[in-house]
């Protein structure tokens, strides 16, 4: 399993003197600076998110979850699907928010 974005992360690991295994790539994704998070689905024991992280100025998106209980996704043997890791770009988005009406 290989794609250009994952290969970029492996090269990043190599430049830091770290390992370049799939587990090392996962670790970089999980520990990198998050710039965006969007909830994709909710389940009983975990919620699934799209994360975008900044690695050396490159925006990288991947899907990962957060447990709702006292276990972790790794305890459940859930791993990041590296075939879905891809480069992202930013764009502007308008959001409508709500507040109490002034009296």
Image (cartoon, helix red, strand yellow):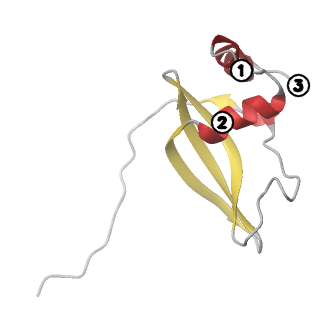
Of residue 18 and residue 2, the one placed in the foreground of this image is: 18
- Residue at left offset 72%, top offset 33%: 85
The Cα atoms of the two marked residues, 1 and 3, are separated by 20 Å
The Cα atoms of the two marked residues, 2 and 3, are separated by 16 Å
Placement of the N terminus among the 4 image quadrants: top right
The residue singled out by tag 3 in the image is 1
Asked if residue 90 is positioned above or below residue 2 in the image, the reply reads below
Relative to 65, 101 lies left or right:
left
Placement of the C terminus among the 4 image quadrants: bottom left
Q: Which mark is residue 18?
A: 1
- Secondary structure beneath disc 2? helix
In the rendered image, residue 42, in percent from the top left (x then y), is placed at 70, 68
Q: Which mark is residue 29?
A: 2
Q: Which mark is residue 78?
A: none
The Cα atoms of the two marked residues, 1 and 2, are separated by 14 Å
- Secondary structure beneath disc 3? loop
Q: Nearer the viewer, mark 2 or mark 3?
A: 2
């Amino acid at each position: 399993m290989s794609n250009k974005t994952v290969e970029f992360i492996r090269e990043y690991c190599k430049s830091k003197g770290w390992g370049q295994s799939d587990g090392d790539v996962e670790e970089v994704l999980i520990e990198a600076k998050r710039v965006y998070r969007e909830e994709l689905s909710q389940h009983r024991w975990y919620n699934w998110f799209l994360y975008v992280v900044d690695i050396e100025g490159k925006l990288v998106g991947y899907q990962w979850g957060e447990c709702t209980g006292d276990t972790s996704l790794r305890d459940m043997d859930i791993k990041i699907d590296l075939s879905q890791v891809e480069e992202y770009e930013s764009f502007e988005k308008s959001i409508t928010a709500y507040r109490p009406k002034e009296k």
